[in-house]
Image (tube, rainbow, N blue to C red):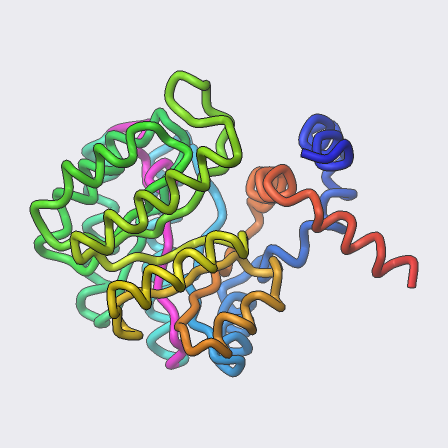
Amino acid sequence: MSWFNKAVSTFIDKVPPSTIAVFAKRYIAGDAIEDAINVTRKLNGEGAMATIDVLGEFVSTKEETEYYRDLAIKVLEEIDANKVNANLSLKLTQMGLKISKDLCIDNIEKILKRAKELGNFVRIDMEDSSCTTDTIEIYDSFRDEYNVGTVLQAYMRRTIKDIDYLSDKPMNFRLCKGIYDEPRMIAYKDYDIVNDNYKYCLETLFKRKAYVGIATHDEILTFHAERLIREYGLKKDEYEFQMLLGVDEELRRIIIENGHRIRVYVPFGKDWLPYSIRRLKENPNIIKSAMKGYLK
């Protein structure tokens, strides 16, 4: 890690929100559903799909969960009404996981039912390690009846075992490196080991006929993913690449030009600060890029 990246990761929590907003706005579609739909329409025009995410997590009241549940359903309905190529991503803590698991399950099922009626798909995002087991179990409980997927994180030591556990049925995962600050006992800390485990997990998933959203901005991993796609003779509709809004748009274009499908994560909402801080820690180079733009 360079001195600049290390400094950003260390001090970003102390930076005023107004300053973070300047650098983070390219990650966020806007405050409203309409902003997310407009960004998705533009992405569709460039040959990319989208997954729309309502920002906000770790809510503390039942009323908040109902608000976010209804907003998630509204996103599905707006996707359908506007005929854009997108699905929905959501977080279990937004649906009440830390209040009551039963409440969370009830909210999720209402969203999944509406998605099924509209012929769409829901991705259950992975959060920090306190949520991993519940997320896996809830995904497992719904995947027979609904078009649903979840997320695996390559930096977690348990991930290959989770793949083994879930391999008895068809699987749909987004595979990413992982972004939360987890202890060494449960997460790999070395960059090369995380990359090696990503490749190992990806190949294992392909062997077991899983549908994988290959979520990475790392061109090394993109290269290895393309190699495995060729090696396993995968058809275009048997996998997809995934990237975050505002990150390495040139690589996104390269992936599309190479004939692959790609889905862009499009977050919106007023609760943008925690998400933006995590993303800036993950990718401090976004600050460098923005500064260069201001100096031109």
The x and y percentages for residue 213 are 35, 58
Residue drawn at 50 percent across, 60 percent down: 266
Q: What segment carries the magenta color?
A: 83-100
The x and y percentages for residue 63 are 36, 39
Q: Compared with residue 90, is residue 15 higher up or lower down, i.e. above or below?
A: above
Q: Is residue 95 magenta?
A: yes
Q: Compared with residue 276, is residue 145 higher up or lower down, i.e. above or below?
A: below
The x and y percentages for residue 50 are 43, 67
Q: How many marks?
A: 0
Q: Is residue 110 magenta?
A: no
Q: Residue furthest right?
A: 295
Give whichever of 109, 267 is nearer the camera.
267
Residue 292 appears in the picture as rendered = yes
Q: Quadrant of residue 98?
A: top left
Residue drawn at 45 percent across, 36 percent down: 194
Give whichever of 121, 247 is nearer the camera.
247
Residue drawn at 21 percent across, 32 percent down: 161
The quadrant in which the C terminus is found is bottom right
Residue 268 appears in the picture as rendered = no
Q: In this rendering, would 133 be left or right of 164?
A: right
Q: Compared with residue 147, is residue 286 higher up or lower down, i.e. above or below?
A: above
The x and y percentages for residue 133 are 25, 30
The quadrant in which the N terminus is found is top right
Residue drawn at 39 percent across, 58 percent down: 225
